[in-house]
Amino acid sequence: MAALGKRALAAYAAVALPLAVAALPVHVHVPKYYSELGLDLALIGFLLLAVRLLDAVSDPLLGALADRIPAHRGGRKTMIAGAVLPLAAGFWLLFNPPAAGEGLAIWLAGSLVLTYLGLSAASIGHFALGSALSRDYVERTRITAARGIAALAGVLFAAAVPELLVRLQGTRAGLSLFAAGYLPLLLVAATITLMAGPAAATVATRAVTLRALLQPLRNPRFRRLALVFLVNGVAAAVPATLLLFFVADVLQRADLTPLFLVLYFVAGAAGMPLWVWLAARIGKSRAWLLAMAVAVSAFVWAYALGAGDVVAFAAVCVLSGLAFGADLALPASLLADVIDDDEGRDGRPDGAYFGLWHLLEKLALALAAGIALPLLQWLDYMPGTVAEQGSPLSWVYALLPCVVKLAAASILWFSELEPRGAPRAWKGVGT
């Protein structure tokens, strides 16, 4: 099969940008915004957790549904198209609530459900579409890298634009304007992907049954890859959860947080072509292992930093960002290879696999917060106080991810995940 051209890759990846844009403001702006409207912080936290758990449980069902849409009805593209309306409506409602009153909690819960439902359905449909675009080992990494670059662009957009609008217009007007501008961005990007993007080479049509939902778990290569993905995801999410605390209390330069975030994400995007090139030569698993080693080296260095070590931490952000680029490009490409094991007369069950994949992503985020934050409290860390070099905050922020990342690397080292045709010199330790 011929490689996709740059224009086709860009068209496929386009919708990843607004999908990434939608995710960040929910986590960053919603708690503070609704607390300013008078909603209790504990209630906000409960609603965010409850809706997120509901969202995670629905992912396998949405994945199986993606496999149910036949080719003559648009396949996975139909699922993306169907998700646009609830995502746009939920996002607009989320940042245009009533001023106050008893119905504010219901408004928040309802708008979160719509936003998460649309975001999950579109993301799963998009991932499943990308998995079925090519059977070529190297081409699949190009596809996932293109999607990752678009997503990183979306994250950078979401990190900068809402903050700028809030400073210019105030919180309520600024976020309302951002939500209004999100609709045309989503529509244009989705139209590009749906109309100009390539169609899947194969589209499965499977009944939405319990067997279909759990089918990926019967694939031994998927179980091994899923375990590596989950453990590695926890390792990546711990420093992301604690970044604001580390920059403010250890480096004592909270004003530079936006700069550090930009360096991290730009390095991730810039590094993706390197991982694509490297994966084609030494294999995706070994390239991923190398990225894990880079991340561990970066966070060991971070542990040694203290107040004012701005340049050194900027270098840590660049190195860890480069490693993050591999996390975006390589695991999903390996997953597309793994799904080949499960292709039968009914086609490829991409949706079922990516439904569980999204559940694992969300579980990793939940586990990171559930482990790191209570651990810091147990170690008597108090946010807002100066944390010296080698403090409990430094241990949990920098060294805990190293331990977890090394566990993920060990599992990956002894797991055979590469398909036939992968670079033989690096195909797997056990082969």
Image (cartoon, grey):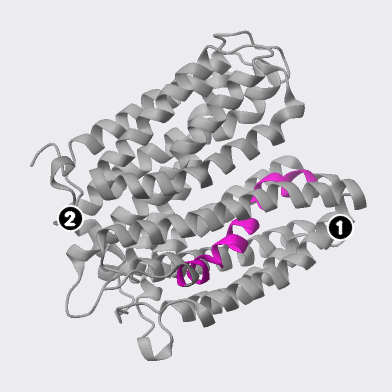
Residues at marks 2 and 1, CA–CA distance in whole angstroms: 57 Å
Give the number of marks. Answer: 2
Q: Is residue 227 left or right of residue 78?
A: left
Q: Viewer-nearest of labels 2 and 1?
A: 2
Q: Is residue 13 left or right of residue 129?
A: right
Q: Which residues are magenta?
A: 8-32
The residue that mark 2 highlights is 419
Q: 192 above or below 124?
A: below
Q: Residue at x 24, y 53 (%)?
A: 222
Which residue is under mark 1? 101
Please identify the residue farthest to the left as the structure is shown: 431
In this rendering, the answer to whether 186 lies above or below 216 is below
Question: Secondary structure under badge 2?
Answer: loop
Residue 381: give x, y in percent of width and height: 62, 16
Q: Nearer the viewer, residue 321 or 69?
A: 321
Q: Is residue 385 visible?
A: yes
Q: Who's the residue at 20% across and 71% down the image?
A: 343
Residue 29 is covered by the magenta coloring: yes
Spot occupied by residue 313 in the image (x, y as percentages of width and height):
59, 22
